[in-house]
């Protein structure tokens, strides 16, 4: 009987030593996050561990990370770990498995929060930033060319304009206007774009949830159980955006035995937004530390 090659591959990998990590943004660079589990480390000698480990992902990229030791455990040094985390845009509760392939070489499988494995490199924030900067510069250059063409078609100029003062003044005005428009656009585009992407989601979906405001909810707001796994696991400060992109509130997110809730800063948000008794607050999750809030009146 022919054997399934995928089964054989899984069977062989089960024989290899491995450990896992859940990467979240709250403690992404802490020693505990970078720690190598004791049950894994004890199967190797100090000479093997106090060196460098090489980690390789599915699409072929690899990173060398130095290993150090404190009185309690071995851990990956911060510089190498942060390079790996940044390059793969981690920090949203991804599930990582590190499988030892020999000689401190590890293959890493990255499972996203939605349960899907990452099979190709992410487009990092640096890529998007450089792309946006290129488009902005390109737009400014076009404006300059239009101004220059317009001035050339006007015929005789006054003495200051012929010396270039007029063109410089117009160029500066265009650049200033372009910069202001770019800042306003970037501030609102991200929030409004996310609102559009998640439009129509139900109140029980991962992307968002809705709460009708009662009297007690004007002081602190208890969150539904359905979104607990997608919020921070410890006390944190979260950002709540107004849909117009111009307002932002920082609110304390508390983790208690009775549940999760918005506390410090929530009352000020209700007064400023404003949120009143009977209103429906619809939250859309941007990431574990940022939400979009849309309020509808009864």
Image (cartoon, helix red, strand yellow):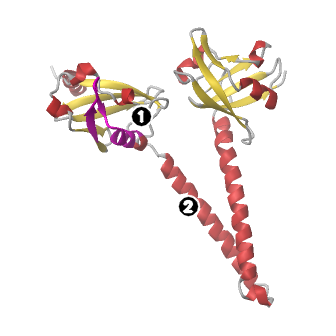
Magenta stretch encompasses residue 161: no
Give x and y (percent) for residue 280.
77, 21
To which quarter of the image does residue 173 belong?
Answer: bottom right
Residue drawn at x 15%, y 28% is 45
Is residue 73 rendered to the left or right of residue 212? left
Can residue 191 be seen from the camera position used here? Answer: yes
Marker disc for residue 29:
1
Marker disc for residue 167:
none
Residue drawn at x 38%, y 43% is 83
Give x and y (percent) for residue 75.
30, 31
Which quarter of the figure is the N terminus placed in? top left
Looking at the image, residue 265 lies above or below residue 244:
above
Give x and y (percent) for residue 19.
29, 24
Callout 2: few (<14), some (14-19), or many (20+) C-alpha neighbours within 10 Å? Answer: few
Give x and y (percent) for residue 246.
74, 42
To which quarter of the image does residue 146 belong?
Answer: bottom right
Callout 1: few (<14), some (14-19), or many (20+) C-alpha neighbours within 10 Å? Answer: some
Label pair 2/1, CB-CB below 8 angstroms: no
Given residues 122 and 47, the one toward you in this image is 47
Given residues 240 and 79, the one toward you in this image is 79
> SS class of the residue under badge 2?
helix
Q: Report the span colored magenta.
A: 65-85
Can residue 273 be seen from the camera position used here? Answer: no
Q: Residue furthest front?
A: 71
Name the front one of labels 2 and 1. Answer: 1
Is residue 64 rendered to the left or right of residue 251? left
């Amino acid at each position: 009987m022919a054997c399934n090659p995928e089964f054989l591959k899984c069977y062989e990998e089960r024989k290899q030593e491995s450990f896992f990590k859940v990467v979240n943004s709250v403690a992404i660079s802490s020693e505990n996050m970078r720690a190598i589990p004791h049950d894994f480390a004890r199967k190797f000698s100090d000479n093997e561990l106090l060196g460098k480990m090489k980690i390789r992902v599915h699409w072929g990229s690899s990173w060398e990370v130095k290993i150090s030791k404190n009185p309690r455990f071995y851990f990956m040094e911060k510089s190498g770990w942060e390079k790996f985390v940044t390059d793969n845009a981690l920090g949203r509760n991804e599930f990582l498995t590190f499988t030892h392939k020999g000689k401190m070489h590890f293959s890493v499988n990255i499972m996203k929060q939605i349960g899907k494995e990452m099979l190709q490199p992410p487009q990092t924030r640096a890529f998007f930033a450089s792309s946006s900067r290129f488009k902005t510069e390109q737009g400014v250059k076009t404006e300059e060319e239009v101004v220059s063409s317009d001035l050339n078609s006007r015929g005789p100029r006054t003495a200051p304009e012929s010396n270039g003062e007029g063109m410089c003044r117009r160029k500066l005005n265009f650049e200033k206007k372009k910069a202001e428009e770019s800042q306003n656009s970037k501030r609102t585009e991200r929030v409004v774009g996310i609102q559009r992407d998640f439009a129509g989601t139900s109140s029980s979906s991962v992307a968002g949830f809705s709460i009708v405001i009662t009297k007690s909810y004007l002081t602190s707001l208890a969150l539904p159980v359905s979104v607990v796994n997608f919020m921070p696991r410890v006390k944190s400060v979260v950002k709540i955006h107004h849909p117009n992109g111009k307002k932002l509130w920082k609110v304390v997110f508390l983790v208690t035995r009775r549940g999760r809730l918005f506390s410090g800063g929530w009352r000020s948000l209700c007064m400023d937004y404003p949120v009143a008794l009977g209103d429906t607050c619809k939250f859309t999750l941007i990431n574990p530390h940022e939400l979009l809030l849309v309020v509808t009146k009864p």
